[in-house]
């Protein structure tokens, strides 16, 4: 998408991954995109090591951790304000397996990190049976969340990895202790009801004004696996049980982000989301992230039009807005959604959900004349009133969709925007 959707602050004061060591020899060019610029990388003449420069000029502080070449990005590029964090208090004795990179266009760090404090989305987007965040704590540098849930692998994804898992362990109790060390790195300790324990690293690289790259890495604690399974794999010199399972965890984690990306890509990060009681973790994460983002950050920035700037503009022909589905339009720079209620009435609203900014036309559904948001499945009636998580609920005062004034002129639908 052409112009930048938001303004990224220039100094994050955090550690970021540039590229895994594994991929460094295969870079086609020494220039690697990083934030709104690039870094140049070369092997150090004093092996082993790397020289990394920002915009090819300013030397950066570099360290290699968990298989990633990491740089400090702060007010002073060469003097970190804090050392690279110890992500885990013990090692499972094997290298982390790093997955393939996932690039998310039009996605920012705030969306990604905020999501982890968003309990409800694990049920609606990832279709877990249940989830709860039991605890969160934060200091300047670290935000820690303890989460438990019950995952049904068959329900949660179409992916081959999850389908296979669903045959071996159909449902799993899942516990995760996740810590973000600044916005660049996350570290998760995970365990499941089968006794499996693993460590997970999330490494984020902001690219350009809008995009983000994510690498996931995992290491499984083999000692927690059944002895017969370990004995079986000891006979096989070609496949390591550690690597096989670690890669499966990385793949499963990456599949989950595909569900999120369907939302992130079209979402607006609202300055004033209409959060419900019980969503305190999101508020805390936002507070913590505000040290890395501008205050009052909104993506994309909302340009409030004065009434005298508004005009009647053609949206489309009446028959184009067919019943049974949500139609999306961009008209005079405004994103709107339109649908037809069962009595033929035309309902037109601003496209972004007031709860957390998801685009109602990108996966939103109609049920009993109500529009349901693709993110947390909240329902809004034809008047735009929030009626809860079922279409038959009563209107509640928490939030309302913004109706778009419209009129019919012959068979043309016009909106006042
Ligand atoms: S963003 Fe949460 S229900 Fe729409
Ligand atoms: Fe998610």
Image (tube, rainbow, N blue to C red):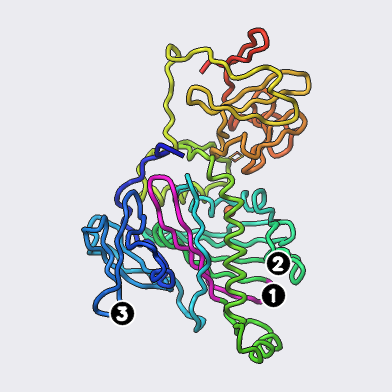
User: Dot 3: within a 10 Å radius of its alpha carbon, few (fewer than 14), some, or many (20 or more) residues?
Assistant: few
State which region is magenta: 193-219
Q: Are marks 2 and 1 in contact (CB under 8 Å)?
A: yes
In the image, is 329 to the left or to the right of 341?
Answer: left
3D distance between C-alphas at marks 2 and 1: 8 Å
In percent of width and height, residue 284 lies at 46, 50
Q: Residue furthest front?
A: 28
As for residue 209 lying within the magenta part, the answer is yes
Residue where numbered disc 2 is placed: 172
Ligand 2 neighbours mark 1 (CB distance < 8 Å): no
* Residue under the image location 35 percent in, 43 percent down: 294
Q: Which numbered circle lies on residue 48?
A: 3
The CA distance from mark 3 to mark 2 is: 42 Å
Do residues under tags 3 and 2 come within 8 Å of each other at their CB atoms? no
Up-down relation of residue 405 to residue 139 (above or below)? above
Along the line of sight, the residue nearer the viewer: 33 or 89: 33
Instruction: Locate residue 96 relative to residue 291 in the image: left or right.
Output: right
């Amino acid at each position: 998408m052409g112009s930048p959707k938001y303004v990224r602050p220039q100094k994050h004061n955090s550690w970021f991954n540039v590229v895994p060591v594994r991929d460094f020899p295969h870079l086609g060019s020494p220039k690697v995109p990083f934030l709104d610029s690039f870094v140049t990388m070369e092997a150090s003449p004093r092996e082993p090591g790397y020289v990394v420069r920002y915009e090819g000029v300013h030397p950066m502080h570099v360290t290699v951790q968990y298989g990633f070449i990491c740089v400090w990005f702060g007010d002073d590029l060469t003097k970190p304000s804090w050392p690279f964090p110890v992500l885990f208090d013990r090692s499972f004795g094997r290298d982390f397996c790093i997955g393939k990179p996932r690039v998310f266009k039009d996605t920012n760090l705030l969306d990604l990190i905020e999501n982890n404090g968003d309990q409800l989305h694990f049920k609606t987007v990832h279709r877990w049976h249940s989830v709860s965040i039991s605890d969160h704590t934060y200091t300047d540098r670290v935000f820690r969340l303890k989460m438990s849930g019950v995952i049904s692998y068959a329900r949660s994804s179409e992916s081959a990895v999850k389908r296979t898992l669903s045959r071996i362990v159909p449902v799993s109790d899942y516990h995760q202790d996740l810590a973000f060390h600044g916005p660049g790195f996350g570290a998760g300790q995970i365990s499941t009801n089968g006794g499996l324990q693993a460590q997970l690293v999330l490494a984020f690289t902001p690219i350009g004004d809008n995009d983000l790259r994510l690498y996931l890495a995992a290491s499984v604690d083999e000692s927690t696996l059944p002895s017969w399974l370990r004995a079986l794999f000891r006979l096989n010199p070609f496949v390591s049980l550690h690597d096989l399972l670690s890669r499966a965890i990385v793949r499963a984690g990456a599949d989950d982000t595909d569900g999120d990306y369907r939302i992130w890509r079209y979402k607006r990060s609202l300055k004033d989301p209409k959060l419900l009681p019980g969503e305190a973790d999101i508020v805390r994460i936002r507070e913590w992230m505000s040290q890395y983002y501008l205050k009052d950050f909104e993506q994309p920035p909302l340009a409030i039009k004065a009434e005298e700037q508004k005009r009647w503009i053609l949206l489309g022909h009446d028959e184009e807005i067919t019943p049974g589905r949500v139609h999306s339009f961009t008209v005079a720079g405004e994103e709107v959604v339109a649908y037809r209620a069962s009595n033929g009435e035309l309902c037109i609203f601003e496209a972004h959900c007031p709860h957390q900014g998801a685009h109602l036309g990108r996966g939103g559904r109609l049920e009993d004349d109500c529009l349901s948001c693709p993110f947390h499945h909240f329902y809004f009636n034809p008047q735009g009133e929030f009626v809860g998580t079922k279409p038959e609920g009563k209107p509640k005062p928490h939030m309302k969709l913004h109706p778009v004034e419209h009129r019919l002129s012959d068979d043309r639908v016009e909106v006042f925007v």
